[in-house]
Amino acid sequence: MIIPSKLQPKARGLMSLQEYTRKEIVEIMSLSALLKKDRTRHRLWNTLEGKTFALIFQKPSTRTRLSIEVAIRELGGHSTYLGWNDLQLGRMESISDTAKVMSRYLDGIIARVHSHNDLTIFAKWSTIPVFNALSDTHHPMQALADLFTINEKKGKLGALKVAFIGDGNNVANSLLIACSKVGLDLFVASPKEYVPDPRIVKTALSNAKESGSIVKVTTEPKEAAKNADVIMTDAATSMGFEDQSEQRTKIFFPRYQVNEKLLKITNKNSIVMHCQPWKIGEEITKTVAYGKQCVAFDQAENRLHTSKAFLHFSYSP
Ligand code: CP
Ligand code: NVA
């Protein structure tokens, strides 16, 4: 039996990709490609041997939960899944006490929360790394898979125009950080009431100055989609905002929808991406979602390879 090591020399967790440099993100992309290839050759990596993780999820998940659970397992580690209400958190035990207790047993915490602030409290009081599996403001593990998918399909991570059409939500925020870090041009088109958080746009603009990319927020979907190499969208109503669904549907559709007409003004070989789950007929039409330009299922698969790469990067000596 291997006794878990409590030493994590490199692991520093993940709140948002802003904490990682361009060089580190590029390294994670290369590791993802290698891990993806090695998986087909049944070549095993054992970075997480003897390590145990908890996944604490306050909201449902298919891709994130499974890709991370499988990633941990394929890297030789163990994980346990806990819904928020399985823990005493559901009975109002404080996040700080929970984090302190969990740190005595585990090597890392992966959490999906409503409030990003709760995640930062977890990170503050844990002595082990805490990883963001989606909060109301960021979805960095998704953004890693998005970058990897763009690189895989387009062969580069620069000199490309990415368009995000829809809600300026967690996925859009993480894309703003990710694209501006690596040097991809990003145009976000959202209704004026739902533009991304101005603080995140400011951070992205400052990253873009360094990487040489363009970041633009507009209310005009056509401006974003015109000559785009990648066109992306997400649900208008994110988890936790269901009470606004009716109002959002009225504001977003049909204007902020990735459909055949919008796709026509993108570049000829453009790809369509969506983090999923999608609402067919709302932010994306059926013909586009299941059409030949859409790579959403490859993107979903890439959640596994990029999660493995990120965990390997974090825990390898
Ligand atoms: N894209 C994504 O995070 O999907 P899940 O909600 O299924 O994890
Ligand atoms: N923006 C969506 C992403 C789901 C993966 C949400 O937060 O519900």
Image (tube, rainbow, N blue to C red):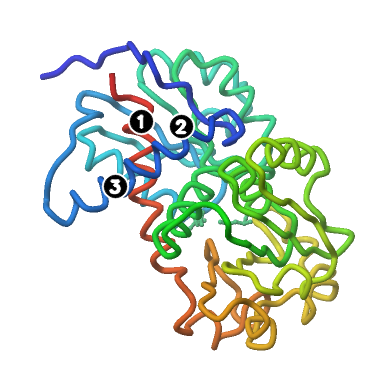
Q: CA distance from mark 3 to mark 2?
A: 23 Å
Picture residue at 20% right of the left edge, 27% below the top: 49
> In the rendered structure, which amino acid carries the disc numbered 2?
Glu
Q: CA distance from mark 3 to mark 1?
A: 16 Å
| Nearest to the observer: residue 94 or residue 50 | 50
Q: Which residue in the protein does label 1 denote?
A: 313
Dot placed on the residue nearer the N-terminal end, 3 or 1 = 3
Dot placed on the residue nearer the N-terminal end, 3 or 2 = 2
Quadrant hosting residue 251: bottom right
Rate crowding at label 3 as few (under 14), some (14 to 19) or many (20 or more) other CA atoms within 10 Å. some
Disc 1 on helix, strand or loop?
Answer: helix
Picture residue at 65% right of the left edge, 66% below the top: 235
- In this rendering, the answer to whether 1 lies above or below 140 is above
Disc 2 on helix, strand or loop?
Answer: helix
Q: Which residue in the protein does label 2 denote?
A: 24
Q: Which residue in the protein does label 3 denote?
A: 70
